[in-house]
Amino acid sequence: MNSIIFSAAARLLVALMFVFSLFMLLRGHHLPGGGFIGGLIGAVSFIVYSLACGPAEARKALRISPEVIAMLGLGVALLAGMFSFFMGDPLFTGQWYWVGGDSYETSAFSINTVLVFDVGVYLVVLGGILSLTYAFEEET
Amino acid sequence: MADHSDPNAPWKTLSGLGTSGLTAILFLYFLQFLGPVAAGEPVRFVWDWIPSLDVSLSFYIDGLSLMFALLITGIGAMVMLYAAKYLAGHKHYDRFAIYLFSFMLSMLGLVLADNLIALFVFWELTTFTSYLLIGFIHTDAKSRRNALQALLLTATGGLAMLAGFILIGITQGTFELSELNAAGTLADQPFYLLILILVLAGAFTKSAQVPFHFWLPNAMAAPTPVSAYLHSATMVKAGVYLLARMHPSLSGSDVWVWTLSIFGAVTAVFASFMALRQTDLKQTLAYTTLMALGTLTMFLAGSTGYAITAAMTFLLVHSLYKAGLFLMIGVVDHSTGTRDANVLGGLKSSMPITAAAAAAAGLAMAGIPPFLGFIAKEVAYAGALEMQLMLFVVPMALVAFALMFAVAGIVAYKPFYGLQGELPHEPHEGPWPMLLGPIVLGVLGLLFGLLPGIAAYWLIEPAVAAVMGAPDVGGRVKLWAGFNLPLLLSLITFALGFVIYQRHLALRERLARIEARAADLDAGWDRLLDHFVTYTKIQTRLIQTGVLRQYMFATFAVFAATVLVTLMARNVGGISLQFAGLSFMEWGVALLILAGSVLVVLTSSRIVGLVALGVVGIGVALIFIMFSAPDVAITQLLVELLVVVLLALAFLKMPNLDPSGSQTHSFPNAVLAITVGVLTTIVVLLVVDQPFDRRLTDFFEAASWTEAFGRNIVNVILVDFRTLDTFGEIAVVAVAALGAFALLKGFARARDAKGGDK
């Protein structure tokens, strides 16, 4: 797509959209969002970039190939789920650690496997869709 | 076969020695159960496996399973040691060691399993591992074909057996063998005949009873250590083990007696003649294995003390001498370069130790006193005389044993003391790791014969007690049982066998002529497979036309038909449509969706159709927003957007749609589309008409915050309550993306290879 306006706007929009996708990922546990939605928005941002500047440029911007991202995501999700083995819980039981307290109310923030799992989902969706789209674009 | 340039060779040899050592340790481990089991106290281990299906991982060590376990680990350790030398320097020796060890473990699981389902799993594991072993020389097409034959035949039998097991589980309420056997015979239970046929199908294919015998001689394509292991104490004995294991449950009917007697006796006699006919000594041994399996099956038909004692004694002695003979043939083959009975001879001076080991095994096989083989034959005749079909079994046993005597001479006497032919290599004695097995096994055969009380007390009597379900009911195992009918029969056997050995060359020619005229089951198997391939090709052409439109039509037609039939069968009541109370906005969205759908059908431009579909999708997303499901709405919107982008990329390469009214917009397509649409609408309306079950909703609303610390219920369900489902879904996403990626890149590469016609 050889439109100067589009490619100039795309560079700005893509960064914003990508940050927005991370925002959607992180807020997901309490508000609309989460790994699936975040991953979709992230994928859309890079698709817009590849439409504006071509798939080769978009691949370079991504740095890691999307197939690897998808597989990494799957691994992250699995590891997050398997962590509960060490705690003696069934597979995929969420594990929570309260920092600065012993419950949600008293702690400053929490570290938990649920968010790690959601990050895995994010990476799989992002990588999966991008690998498909890039392959399509390079085909044509 | 040796390739000494491999730098990893020492490690590979070590892997072989390691597995051999582990197996020997297992053997020592099982020795400790001899005491309790001989004292009549079986041991049972249980772990829950699939409690919801009443499937547990339970192991049961009684006389029968312990005898098998000791044979499997004991002979296994020797065979693995032997293989480390036999295949030394082979490129894939490490692979071989792993296969053999896995096979040993599967076999061990099979004989120790107390649960029928676990037994089946181990049963099929032995099938798969033996497939790898038989087809180990994978560069040889014949070897691959024979491995596949063994796999298909025994796995098919195994599946029939599984059906039988499930029937037992359903009708008896338990899958535990120990409980089933304690409950006594199933002969008067419903489905007994069906269960018996299905289980026998598994046992007979695995133990190669006629007419399923042809895979066993073909399995000789494997390296000799594999043959020695698979055909002495393990793989093929699994069927016999099953018959013995389930003897208390399945015997006790005339069908059992007749089927086992006839199949076993026919197999035994047929195989002994075939053994005589072969000139390749390994093939000869293969057929004698078949003979042993037939004999064992025949004796398991009986339920009297001597019949079962005969089966167990013969099982023990056969495992010992057959493994020894196979290993011995391997040494001879290794040293002289041939296995041809017509060529081999006069090796006693160059291979004295092998000759001694062969003599011990051969004398046991021929049943000459004071070897255990003699006792086994005596007990066998005593058992045969007690059998229900005595008039049939005794002559058959006599013929088989006499032929065995002659074959023992051909295998163990002639190569060492007969006339020497032209040998490919100058013979030399084998290395000690290859001689250890034959020697130990030969000595055991002699020792158990001289002191039959040891074998009887520790091994045979507990095994008989396990099969009979009661101690001290078996026949007496001793070297000298006095002048009686079995002894007379033994003497007749020797005389007959000696005459056959003297005339075996003439007899072999005559057998070869008969064989040439007889039906060839092995070739029949190939024809069967060819027909099957032809059939599948026709079926594939019919079902998989390669036209996407036809696939879609078939899929939706099946969908419509099943929904329609269900709706009519359930005779659902009327549907009430309520348009009152719809807001202006809801009407607007509905019309938007409707307009999009109509446009998709009418347009002749792909891009217009695509955009119209996008409108439909966005309309649906709007509905989600109106009913306050923001997560679903956002996802729907984004997916819709991505679909449009992806399809637009694909459409760049595709031609315009056919103009409306052309042939592909045919009448059946329209009817199907409308039917599916109407049915889906009806189903949705029916679902909505049902009172809403709030139990899950209430649970998630209540638990989402208290248990998972999240306020967005959709997300909490995705990443906490139903994480396993989500994981499955993202795995699907990843695999689908990889698959599509591979397809697209593959096409691109294929096109480039053709010269890149863009």
Image (spheres, coloured by chain):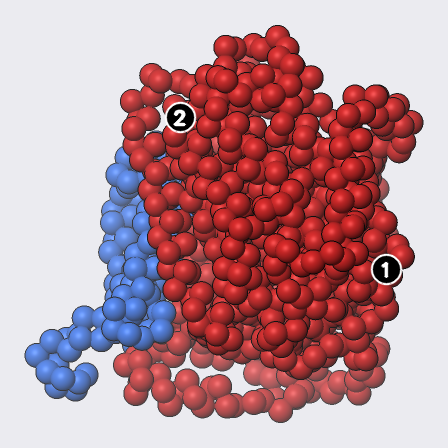
Chain colours: A blue, B red
Residue visible at 49% across and 28% down in the picture: B354
Q: Quick check: A101 above or below B624?
A: below
Would you say the residues marked 1 and 2 are in contact, meaning their CB atoms lie under 8 Å apart?
Answer: no
Residue visible at 65% across and 88% down in the picture: B690
- What is the C-alpha distance between the residues marked 1 and 2? 47 Å
Amino acid beneath label 1: Met
Amino acid beneath label 2: Pro
Camera-nearest residue between B272 and B167:
B272
Determine which quarter of the picture holds residue B256. Answer: bottom right
- In the image, taking residue B325 as reference, residue B687 lies left or right, namely right
Indicate the position of residue B550 as horizontal and vertical percent values: 76, 46
Q: Chain of mark 2?
A: B
Using the rendered image of the protein, determine whether residue B33 is visible from the camera's viewpoint.
yes
Q: Quick check: B302 above or below B470?
A: above
The mark found on residue B431 in the picture is 2
Residue visible at 85% across and 65% down in the picture: B388
**Which tag, 1 or 2, sits closer to the chain's start?**
1
Q: Which secondary structure, mark 1?
A: helix
Residue denoted by label 1:
B390
Considering every residue shown, the one lying at the far right of the view is: B517
Residue visible at 81% across and 25% down in the picture: B503
Indicate the position of residue B623 as horizontal and vertical percent values: 53, 73
Q: Chain of mark 1?
A: B
- In the image, taking residue B722 as reference, residue A22 lies left or right, namely left
Q: Which secondary structure, mark 2?
A: loop
- In the image, taking residue B178 as reference, residue B579 lies left or right, namely right
Q: Quick check: B597 above or below B691?
A: above
User: Does mark 2 fall on the same chain as mark 1?
Assistant: yes
